[in-house]
């Protein structure tokens, strides 16, 4: 394969820290450094892990120096040493960073908090890996869109989809987001329909007839989707399960085996020794899969902090070349410990 891909990560928290660790696990990539706004404990953790830390800008550089936190330079310095930057800054900040990447002549991957129009190419590895080949800028879609795209890709490939409807129960906040809620409410997110997820899925699966509704619930564990998909041909339940089992990065579980809730899934990841309890797969309850004529019903769980990590790694390879979709996904999955496992009784 080609030469080592030099990668930087800008924004080092929920997604950025995970992507940085995942880049370090790839034998064809080098993590040159990460860029951070604040000299907080995460800067020290990065250094403990042997990662060079850069300040986001001159003001941030000053706060690093004032707090006597080791710093290699600024984002501009980091950009000089990389082929590609993964931007994992908060929603909208990525868009304001794009001119900096353009000036530096560096390819960039943005996250799902940015608009599709920022790159005009939204990525989910199994759906459109090849489309990344000629792109300088790619957007890896959000966690929920990734989970929906993987699931719908499986059903579209096997049966064709007439229409898809999904109700998403979203986690209220990530585990360490103490300032966010809700604490004791279910919030319409938003009250208007469709939620932003439907057009976002259509940015990857073009022309798909999909409507989504979303609410936010007081949990940090995962998102849970209720899906109703009308297929073009009447399937058997077994064939639907086969299609989902054969789809990469999908995991089937079963309530009879003890998987009663998203908490059981997080417990499984913890007991399996997954880093940060991460679940990279879209998780479908096999016993929820119900077929009525051409309609399929199922529950899908999405680990918001983890599901886009393998997508970012594959997007890096898609944009820099040398690997087919299957090769890249296999290398990524091997490095992250994603193996096909079916937790059904
Ligand atoms: P986060 O708030 O956990 O991390 C962002 C980090 O970037 C913070 O440490 C923040 O201090 C830092 N930052 C802010 N401005 C910066 C700047 N100018 N330069 C460098 N660093 C800066 O955010 P996140 O949850 O990792 O989200 C990042 C992106 O990933 C967003 O687009 C988000 O929508 C998307 N995403 C998030 C999740 C999730 O559930 N957390 C899931 C999928 C996609």
Image (cartoon, rainbow, N blue to C red):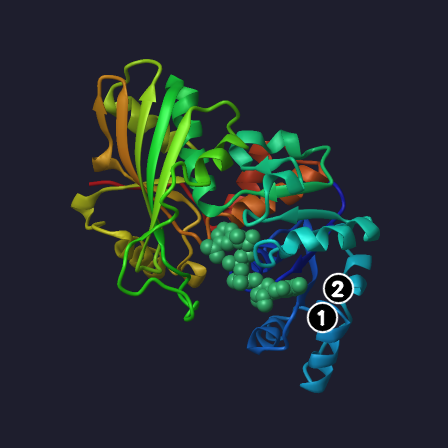
State the residue in front, 225 or 323.
225
Where is residue 11? Give x, y as percent. 62, 62
Q: Is mark 2 within 8 Å of ligand 1?
A: yes
Q: Which residue is mark 2?
A: 75
Q: Which mark is residue 55?
A: 1
Label 2 residue SS: helix
Residue 204 occupies quadrant: top right
**Disc 2 packing (10 Å; few <14; some 14–19; many ≥20):** many
At 60% from the left edge and 33% from the top edge, which residue is drawn?
129
Q: Is residue 21 left or right of residue 289?
A: right
Label 1 residue SS: strand
The earlier-in-sequence mark between 2 and 1 is: 1
Q: Quadrant of the C terminus?
A: top left
Q: Is residue 190 left or right of residue 45?
A: left
Where is residue 183? Give x, y as percent. 30, 65
Tell me the distance, in whole angstroms, between the alpha carbons under discs 2 and 1.
6 Å
């Amino acid at each position: 394969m080609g030469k080592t891909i030099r990668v930087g990560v800008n924004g080092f928290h929920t997604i950025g820290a995970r992507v940085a660790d995942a880049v370090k696990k790839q034998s064809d990539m080098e993590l040159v450094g990460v860029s951070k706004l604040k000299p907080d404990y995460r800067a020290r953790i990065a250094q403990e892990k042997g990662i060079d830390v850069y300040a986001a800008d001159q003001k941030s550089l000053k706060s690093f120096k004032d707090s006597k936190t080791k710093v290699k330079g600024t984002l501009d310095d980091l950009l000089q040493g990389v082929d590609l930057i993964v931007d994992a800054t908060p929603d909208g900040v990525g868009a304001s960073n794009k001119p900096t990447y353009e000036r530096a002549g560096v390819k960039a991957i943005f996250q799902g908090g940015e608009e599709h129009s920022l790159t005009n190419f939204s990525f989910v590895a199994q759906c459109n890996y090849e489309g990344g080949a000629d792109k300088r800028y790619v957007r890896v879609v959000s966690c929920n869109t990734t989970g929906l795209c993987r699931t719908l890709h499986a059903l579209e490939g096997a049966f064709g989809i007439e229409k898809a409807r999904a109700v998403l129960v979203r986690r209220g906040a990530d585990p360490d987001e103490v300032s966010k809620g809700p604490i004791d409410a279910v919030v319409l997110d938003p009250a208007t329909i469709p939620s932003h997820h439907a057009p976002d899925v259509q940015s990857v699966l073009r022309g798909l007839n999909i409507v989504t509704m979303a609410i936010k619930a007081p949990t940090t564990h995962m998102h849970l989707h209720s899906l109703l998909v009308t297929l073009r041909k009447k399937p058997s339940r077994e064939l639907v399960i086969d299609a989902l089992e054969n789809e990469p990065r999908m995991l089937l579980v079963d309530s009879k085996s003890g998987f009663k809730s998203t908490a059981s899934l997080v417990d499984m990841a913890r007991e399996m020794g997954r880093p940060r309890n991460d679940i990279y797969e879209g998780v479908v309850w096999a016993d929820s899969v119900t077929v009525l004529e051409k309609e399929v019903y199922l529950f899908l769980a999405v680990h918001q902090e983890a599901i886009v990590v393998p997508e970012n790694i594959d997007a890096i390879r898609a944009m820099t070349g040398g690997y087919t979709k299957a090769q890249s996904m296999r290398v990524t999955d091997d490095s992250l410990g994603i193996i096909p496992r079916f937790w059904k009784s």
